[in-house]
Image (cartoon, rainbow, N blue to C red):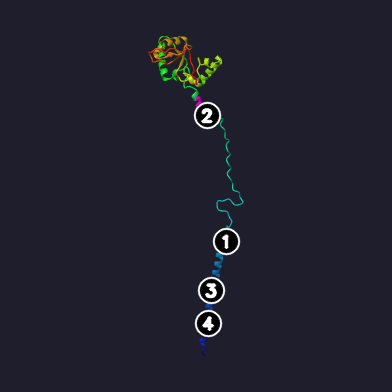
Amino acid sequence: MTSPLPPRRRGMARSRLLGVIGVAGVGLVGGSLLLWHAQLGEFLGLAADKEPVVSTVGAPAVGEPPASTPATRAPKPTPKPTRTPSTSPKTTEKSEQTETTEKPAVREESIEGLSPKLRSRLKKAITAADRDGVTIRITSARRTSTKQQRLFNEALQQYGSYKVATRWVLPPKYSAHVQGKAVDIGPTAAMTWLNQNGWRYGVCRRYDNEPWHFEALSAPGKKCPPREPHAVAKSD
């Protein structure tokens, strides 16, 4: 008896086709699940690693203190007390100028303050007197105006008269001492020697009442002019 083979083969082919389709479907579904699971895991992992986003609206700039913290201000330096000078520069300068004007550059007992002519002649006379054994000492050469005014005021008190006082002491503006053109000497021996020999050097005694007072009144080698009785102040 012969079996009908064709129907069985068609049934087996259909079963195989269905099996292949089933396997493919399962694989497709499994692959889809795996892919979905991987994407989900990556998404969850990245979300866990990322820092939360914080809004920067209203946040302070980098390097600036927050709004709630007051800015620290540098302390103001304490001003140093100023000292008021006791004497202003102008006053000091003025006083220095006055002092320089009033004080002579040399002592009153020195011939260095005299005029060049009288100083030169007097040096030669002093040297000649020294050879003769006579020492000429300078008692008063150039004077300041202040000193001359004081001497004149004392003469006024002593004699009580301007006319009489000026016979001995002249006011500063008329005095030859203030101009450096007169010299008073001592002691008596020096006065005598210079009165006798001063004409040789151009140094002469001027007044009868003042044997100590000498000036350069003539050229060296010529006789001195006649002496005056006393000094006379010029009228203003």
Asked if the residues shown at circle 4 and circle 3 are in contact, with their CB atoms under 8 angstroms apart, the answer is no
Observer-side mark, 4 or 2, equals 2
> Which of the two residues, 136 or 162, is positioned nearer the viewer here?
162
What type of secondary structure mainly makes up the magenta span?
helix
Amino acid marked by disc 1: Ala
Sequence-wise, the earlier of marks 1 and 4 is 4
**Mark 2 sits on what residue?**
92
- In what element is the residue under mark 4? helix
Q: Is residue 31 above or below residue 105?
A: below
Q: Residues within 10 Å of mark 3 (few under 14, many from 20)?
A: few
- In what element is the residue under mark 1? helix
Q: Residues within 10 Å of mark 4 (few under 14, many from 20)?
A: few
Sequence-wise, the earlier of marks 1 and 2 is 1
Q: Which residues are magenta?
A: 92-99
Q: Residue 176, how many percent across, how many down? A: 46, 18
- In what element is the residue under mark 2? helix
Residue 186 appears in the rendering: no
Distance, label 1 to label 2, CA atoms, is 87 Å
Q: Which mark is residue 48?
A: 1
Q: Residue 27, how many percent across, how many down? A: 53, 73
Q: Residues within 10 Å of mark 1 (few under 14, many from 20)?
A: few
Observer-side mark, 1 or 4, equals 1
Amino acid marked by disc 3: Leu
As drawn, is 201 to the left or to the right of 149? left
Observer-side mark, 1 or 2, equals 2
Sequence-wise, the earlier of marks 4 and 3 is 4
Sequence-wise, the earlier of marks 4 and 2 is 4
Observer-side mark, 3 or 1, equals 1
Q: Residue 24, how many percent across, how many down? A: 52, 75
Distance, label 3 to label 1, CA atoms, is 30 Å
**Mark 4 sits on what residue?**
14
Q: Which mark is residue 28?
A: 3
